[in-house]
Image (spheres, helix red, strand yellow):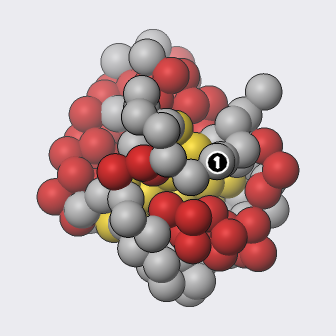
Amino acid sequence: MVTWGCIGFLTNKAMAAPAREVLLQTQKEEKVKAARQVCPRGLYDRQPQWLKDAFPLAKHQSDTRLNFAHGGAVIGIPGGAGQIRSYHPWGYLNDESPFQPDAGECYNEALSVVALAPSSPTLPQGRAGTPMSVMT
């Protein structure tokens, strides 16, 4: 449930502010594609029509991005150090970080590129792992 809450928060921020991008990092690209379909897209599809009219989707969509017409986006990236370096998002979520062998490196890279870094969440998912910052 924490994952859904964080993804809802980040999707809302990408949807409501022009050109705002947020990143969702998961273990593998397959999980990125599945998470994009279920989480941000599912949340968008279930909102009232007046919100969809106010914040329409862009015509071009991909398996790893949910693009809004005003330029905002929810972008999914696979786990691994070096994946985040080419982005400069407003927010970042690292899901199931203890299951990513280099989650600590991913987090350190996120600190250097994410505008919202002090409150960007990483979700431990019930196993001990690298200490991470959690959104408050």
As helix, strand or loop, the secondary structure at mark 1 comes to loop
Depicted 21 relative to depicted 113: above or below:
above
State whether residue 88 is above or below residue 28.
Answer: below
Q: Residue at x 58, y 83 (%)?
A: 85
In x, y percent, where is residue 28? 24, 62
Farthest front residue in view: 128
Relative depth, front residue between 70 and 73: 73
Position of residue 78 measured from the top left corner of the image (x, y, whole percent): 33, 66
What residue is rendered at 41% in x and 34% in y? 127
Residue pictured at 48% horizontal, 38% vertical: 128
* 14 vs 33, nearest the viewer: 33
Quarter of the image where the C terminus is located:
top right
**Image quarter hosting the N terminus:** top left
Which class describes the residues within 10 Å of circle 1: few (<14), some (14-19), or many (20+)? few
Task: Describe residue 10's horizontal placement relative to residue 99 as left or right.
Answer: right
Q: Of 16 and 7, which appears nearest the observer? A: 7
Q: At label 1, which amino acid type do we have?
A: Pro
> Does residue 31 appear to the left or right of 67 in the view shown?
left
- Residue 42 in percent (x, y) is at 31, 29
Q: What residue is pinned by disc 1?
A: 131
Q: Quadrant of residue 60?
A: bottom left
Instruction: Say how many tags the image has.
Output: 1
Locate residue 104: give its quadrant. Answer: bottom right
Q: Is residue 50 visible?
A: yes
Residue at image position (20%, 46%) is 34
Residue 100 locus on image (x, y percent): 37, 59
Q: Is residue 14 visible?
A: no
